Amino acid sequence: MNILSVVILLTSFFNLFLGLFIFFKRKKNYAFSAFCFLTAIWVFSNFVLVEKPSIFYLKTTYALGSVALTSACFWALSIASEKITKKKIFFLILLGLIFFSWSYLTPIENSHNNHLYSMGLEVEKGGMFFSAYTVFVALLFGFILFFLIRKYRKNKDAKIGYVLLGASLQVITIISLTFILPLFGFHKLSALDSPSSLFFVFFSFLAIAKYNLLNLKVVLTEILVFAAGIILLTLPFAVKEPQLKVLTLALFFVFSCFGYLLIRTAKREVKRKEILETEVRKRTQELQKAKTEAEETSQKLRKRNEELERFYKLTVGRELKMIELKKKLNQALASQNRD
């Protein structure tokens, strides 16, 4: 197994786990999960093609690619909050089935084995399929990016921005490696089209970690547990001795139990943290509300005090004037009596 095969296999693995994490979220996104699962299967078919080049596996990559791309359209519609009508469902499924079937029914005769894994494959038959497939891929890529861009421009959501960046880099890489470079003789580079989905996986996880779509601690715990679990699960098939097979299976089941408890503990800690944060936010809001009410009451008392002071000044001033006038009146009367 060469380095390219390892990279493609890891890419399939990461797509699979991204789909699992989204699937087990509290707010599930089944369209996104289905897209990740189908992408993982498509990437794995590319791994098989690199390891065992054949016309059948080449057709399989095209067939699975059409299905994965069609599922991405449903995800793009859901993330853009577009209504998925029965007509849209029927049209997209029909389109995917047409190219899925066409991929296997198209007669392909390879004349150059070193050009097997490329859209620039030199063939004696089936040229119309490659042209139609190219148009199909370009239209669906444009469809997906259009809805992602429109959603981002409408809401200015940073999470959508990260996902859009990852999807754009993946689309640009696939178009460059699969459609453009083979025209200039770079056929072997097209084998890197499936690892380009790592762009999408990386930026999706970045959005998850930075904007708390999923808790990072839980995500990392699940990644480690599932990765170790898969490694332990493959060990019984790698050893020949019956005793070792039983031992590795026992290790797998023991690890599965501890892994389950570890993930559940991490989720409980996250849940407790969320409850505490909710209570703190609630208490902070109550204190802020009490502060606002106190400020309003203080303002009302200050205003009332100012009104009382004005009333006091007016009343006292009038009384003083009356006393002064009374004194003058008394003085005038006294002066008149002396006269």
Image (cartoon, rainbow, N blue to C red):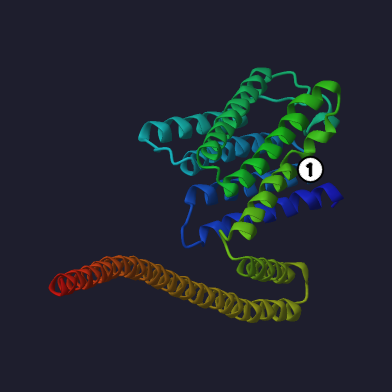
SS state under label 1 = helix
Q: Which residue corresponds to the image point at 69% horizontal and 48% vertical from the top-left?
A: 44
For the C terminus, the quadrant is: bottom left
For residue 332, above or below residue 180: below
Q: Nearer the viewer, residue 200 or 72?
A: 200
Q: In the rendered view, does 277 fall on the left or right side of 331?
A: right
- Is 18 left or right of 110, judged from the image as shown? left
| Position of residue 85 measured from the top left corner of the image (x, y, whole percent) | 37, 35
Q: Horizontal placement of 84 versus 307: left or right?
A: right
| Residue found farthest to the front | 339
| Figure quadrant of residue 153 | top right
Q: Nearer the viewer, residue 252 or 197?
A: 197
**Which residue shows up at 46% across the image and 58% down it?**
27
Query: Pointer 1: residues within 10 angstroms few (<14), some, or many (20+)?
Result: many
The quadrant where residue 62 appears: top right
The percent position of residue 186, horizontal first and vertical second, equals 85, 28
Q: Is residue 55 visible?
A: no
Q: Nearer the viewer, residue 253 or 307?
A: 307
At 73% from the left and 42% from the top, the residue drawn is 196
Q: Position of residue 223 (x, y in %)?
A: 67, 65
Amino acid type, callout 1: Val
In the drawing, does residue 187 fall left or right of residue 36? right
Q: Which residue is mark 1?
A: 50
